[in-house]
């Protein structure tokens, strides 16, 4: 736990670190992402807890990347901070990764997700 005057703590930080903490505080810990199959192929997604935030991709893996790019763009976060802030991934996949499950189980989970026309998923930071 930080002790003392928060303003004094920020004054002692480098300028970049202060901005980094601002970005951490701005970003949600979880996302609710509504995924749709696009009629012309691929997917599009609505990030439900960020009004007006949508994205699209040709495949599911690219969609995960585009969701992250959309969130970073939504909060106007520069490229130099993005990697340090972590990335959002679907909770079902995160759980499988944490359990050190085999690649086949992850692929099966992805196939179930993309099999439906519309699916709402919770994304979490890794």
Image (cartoon, rainbow, N blue to C red):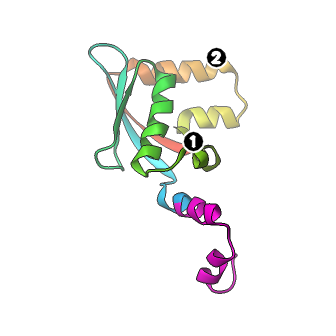
Question: Viewed as shown, does residue 2 lie left or right of 106?
Answer: right
The answer to whether residue 35 shows anywhere in this view is no
The image quadrant of residue 59 is top left
Position of residue 108 relative to residue 97, above or below, is above
> Residue 101: image x %, image y %?
70, 27
* Residue 21 magenta-highlighted: yes
* Within-10-Å neighbours for mark 1: few <14, some 14–19, many 20+: some
Secondary element under disc 1, as helix, strand or loop, is: loop
Question: Viewed as shown, does residue 44 lie left or right of 123?
Answer: left
| Magenta stretch secondary structure, dominant | helix
Question: Viewed as shown, does residue 11 lie left or right of 39?
Answer: right
**Can you tell which of label 1 and label 2 is closer to the viewer?**
1
> Residue 65: image x %, image y %?
51, 31
The answer to whether residue 30 shows anywhere in this view is yes
Q: Name the residue carrying label 2.
A: 104
| Highlighted magenta segment, given as a residue range | 1-22
* 23, 99: nearer the viewer: 23
Q: Name the residue carrying label 1.
A: 87
* 11, 65: nearer the viewer: 11
Position of residue 67 relative to residue 43, above or below, is below
Q: Residue furthest front?
A: 15
Position of residue 87 relative to residue 108, above or below, is below
* Sequence order check, earlier mark of 1 and 2: 1
């Amino acid at each position: 736990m930080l002790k003392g005057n928060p303003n004094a703590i920020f004054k002692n930080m480098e300028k970049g670190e202060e901005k980094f903490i601002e970005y951490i505080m701005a970003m949600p810990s979880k996302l609710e992402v509504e995924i749709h199959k696009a009629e012309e192929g691929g997917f599009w997604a609505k990030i439900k807890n960020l009004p007006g935030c949508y994205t699209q991709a040709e495949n599911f893996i690219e969609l995960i990347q585009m969701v992250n790019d959309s969130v970073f763009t939504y909060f106007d976060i520069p490229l130099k901070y993005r990697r340090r802030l972590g990335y959002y991934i679907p909770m079902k996949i995160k759980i499988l990764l944490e359990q050190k499950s085999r690649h086949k189980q992850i692929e099966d989970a992805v196939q179930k997700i993309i099999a439906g026309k519309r699916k709402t998923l919770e994304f979490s930071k890794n």
